[in-house]
Image: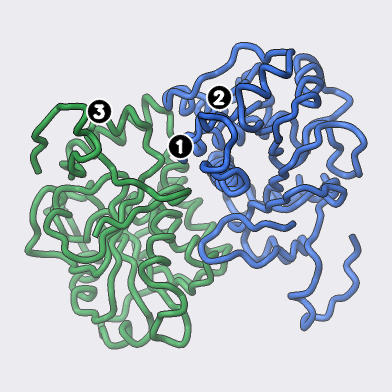
Chain colours: A green, B blue
Amino acid sequence: MNHSSADPDCEPTEPLRYLSKEDAVAMETELLRDYRFGQQQLMEILGHACAVAIAKAFPLGTLNKRQPTVLVVCGPDKNGCIGLACARHLRVFEYMPTVFYPKRSAHSLHQDFTVQCERMDIPFLSYLPTEVQLINDAYNLIVDAVLGPETELGAVEEPFTSILLTLRGVKIPIASLDIPSGWDPDETSTDGLSPAVLISLMAPKRCALSFSGTHFLAGRFLPYDIQKKYDLNPPKFSGTDYIAELH
Amino acid sequence: MNHSSADPDCEPTEPLRYLSKEDAVAMETELLRDYRFGQQQLMEILGHACAVAIAKAFPLGTLNKRQPTVLVVCGPDKNGCIGLACARHLRVFEYMPTVFYPKRSAHSLHQDFTVQCERMDIPFLSYLPTEVQLINDAYNLIVDAVLGPETELGAVEEPFTSILLTLRGVKIPIASLDIPSGWDPDETSTDGLSPAVLISLMAPKRCALSFSGTHFLAGRFLPYDIQKKYDLNPPKFSGTDYIAELH
């Protein structure tokens, strides 16, 4: 996506920026170092916003199953931890999340988010059924918090390769956090998951240009100087909303 | 407020609990120690919820002044830090907050929330005008984040005694975070500020029983076991709202 003009009068019509992986990493480093945001704070904000987006895309009253079940699949890194925060907020919104978190992070911050879920009586699965029909029957949707933009796709190991294979076979809708797992953040993907919903965190990544499902942006808290520096041109958020639907 | 019955069938009709200072402290200790919530996380959640409540009580389109100015007065402790988070979210919601934070905390977490405001270009006042007319003319409302339930009223020192005296004289509405500054959390107050809006954090404190203005509760994130243990009986929150209006 090209930016054509630097005319300040045209600013509101400038297109939304789709960040490269490199810029996304640089922006987050800046937020943490110069703006003194905390990791815990960012994960809480983003997990909360993701749960709000999921509740908007899949309202309680519209779910097919008798119970408002949601399977939240969490990877070993930051994306997985935001998934844990999202699961906790979904529980607060009266969904029934179940977490599958096969490779728990040793990071104390991630452990705290795990304990918060456990103490909210959110069940954790000890394994993911390989028979996808069991998943289709048990849950209304899947939250994909497996791999984030920071993941090196070449280095993805078991159990995550098998998990992605299973998730590619499910029929229920998937909502992916930040990028669909298995996608390269910088490129149009031919591989990985095909989510119905994508929730971009802070700013969409380049790969989202080829995403045609329901697309939310969660990231209204960003300081204006950061928005300007990275030419983010975020959409207009309504009222006190922390998410915006892009398409 | 007395709880009359332990009959589980009557649970939904049990009255909202107004916590003693002692119980409020015990509950927060438990949240941090056993549920592994972080201070940074709690302040972010509560500051955000306060900003949402203020935007609900004083919508942008209804303000009297030409600019949507808000004066956020922050004390030296936790209440003041939640005020800083609230100011930042108000800025995101397109209000124009100005912060008065005369005695900055040495706590690194509080300093981080201060830098976040400064980097959002929120102005900080170096002194509070003693001429209240200047305050009435410049701002639409005041956010009172001066003293919290943890403050020992007998130990309040300058500049806060003078600040409370000034704020008691203003004509514009005040929104207090958790308790009105100068009130004893456990008792009906005859002293302190008279806010138009009170935003109780996590659960209302006993003193709020004698508050007759617009009353919000910010605290939907609390785990159910905590709600039960402390007989909180929170109201029904709507949709994905994190605040509820009590009266």
Mark 1 falls on what kind of element? loop
C-alpha distance separating marks 2 and 3: 24 Å
Nearer-the-camera pick, A162 or A56: A56
Q: Which residue is mark 1?
A: B94
Residue B196, by quadrant, is: top right
**Residue type of the residue flagged with mark 1:** Glu
Residue B201, percent across and down? Answer: 68, 47
Residue A229: numbered disc: 3
Nearer-the-camera pick, A116 or A196: A196
C-alpha distance separating marks 1 and 3: 20 Å
Same-chain check, marks 1 and 2: yes
> Residue placed at 55% from the left, 59% from the top?
B241
Chain of the residue that carries numbered disc 2 in the rendered image: B
Residue B25, percent across and down? Answer: 76, 45
> Residue placed at 23% from the left, 73% from the top?
A167
Residue A159, percent across and down? Answer: 25, 66
* Numbered disc in front, either 1 or 3: 1
Residue B149, by quadrant, is: top right
User: Position of A129 compared to B132: left or right?
Assistant: left
Mark 3 falls on what kind of element? helix
Q: Which residue is mark 2?
A: B98
